[in-house]
């Protein structure tokens, strides 16, 4: 797992990138990604500014503010910020594949009514170095969400 120092060095070397980058989102072993947009598909609601109340029992999607690029020697894992878990948000995330570039779309579920604002820190991304460079990066394996700039269902 990369430390804050390792993340900064990997960014300097062009191995990973986070844009926009904010020093106050860097953690000792990861980076806090912010809400860039919110969607409630069942209600056809999609916002990119302000805040929204999400009713109990609602499935919603978060698009990260930051675009992330994971190089061919790294993968990343996402963790829901504990403040959201304590407020009743449930979420499950997969790995961010080596070679991925774009914003991340995250699915979540509200077990209680919550309020989320654009710009809130929502997940922590942690980077891991692979033992060797991948043979085929994300874009050559599936690439379904490569270079996405907005929430994609």
Image: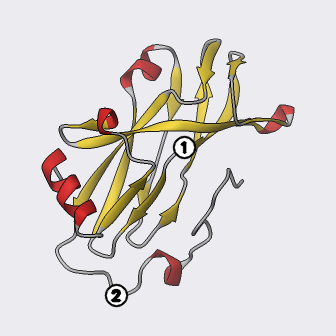
In the image, is residue 34 above or below residue 53?
below
Question: Label 2 crowding class (10 Å Cα cut-off): few <14, some 14-19, many 20+?
Answer: few
In primary-sequence order, the first of circles 2 and 1 is 1
Q: Name the residue under label 1.
A: 65
Q: Residue at 34% across / 71% down in the picture?
A: 71
In the image, is residue 142 above or below residue 127?
below
Q: Where is residue 35 in the image (x, y as percent from the top left)?
A: 55, 35
Asked whether residue 1 appears in the rendered view, the answer is no
Q: Mark 2 points at which residue?
A: 135
Asked whether residue 40 appears in the rendered view, the answer is yes
Inter-mark Cα distance, 2 to 1: 29 Å
Q: Position of residue 24 (x, y in %)?
A: 31, 32
Question: In screen coordinates, is 49 left or right of 103?
Answer: right
> In the displayed image of the protein, which residue is found farthest to the right?
44
Q: Residue at 37% across / 70% down in the picture?
A: 98
Relative to the observer, which residue lies in front, 9 or 125?
A: 9
Q: Position of residue 75 (x, y in %)?
A: 32, 63
Q: In which image quadrant can residue 112 be found?
A: top right
Name the image colouring. Answer: secondary structure
Q: Residue at 57% across / 74% down in the picture?
A: 143
- Which element type, helix, strand or loop, lies under badge 2? loop
Q: Which mark is residue 97?
A: none
Question: In screen coordinates, is 61 left or right of 9?
Answer: right
Q: Residue at 68% across / 32% down in the picture?
A: 59
Question: In screen coordinates, is 149 left or right of 12?
Answer: right
Mark 2 or 1: in front is 1
Q: In which image quadrant can residue 72 be found?
A: bottom left
Does the CB distance between marks 2 and 1 fall below 8 Å?
no
Q: Position of residue 4 (x, y in %)?
A: 18, 45
Question: In screen coordinates, is 60 left or right of 8?
Answer: right
Relative to the observer, which residue lies in front, 124 or 26?
A: 26
> In the displayed image of the protein, which residue is found farthest to the bottom?
135
């Amino acid at each position: 797992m990369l430390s804050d120092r390792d993340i900064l060095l990997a960014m300097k070397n062009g191995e990973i990138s986070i844009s926009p980058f904010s020093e106050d989102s860097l953690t000792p072993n990861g980076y806090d990604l912010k809400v860039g947009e919110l969607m409630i598909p069942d209600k056809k609601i999609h916002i990119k500014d302000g805040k929204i109340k999400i009713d109990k029992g609602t499935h919603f999607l978060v698009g990260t503010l930051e675009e992330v690029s994971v190089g061919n020697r790294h993968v990343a894992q996402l963790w829901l910020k504990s403040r959201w878990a304590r407020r009743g948000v449930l979420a499950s995330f997969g790995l961010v594949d080596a070679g991925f570039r774009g914003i991340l779309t995250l699915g979540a579920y509200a077990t209680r009514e919550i309020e989320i604002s654009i710009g809130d820190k929502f997940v922590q991304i942690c980077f891991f170095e692979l033992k060797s460079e991948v043979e085929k990066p994300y874009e050559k394996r599936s690439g379904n969400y490569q270079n996405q700039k907005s929430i994609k269902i």
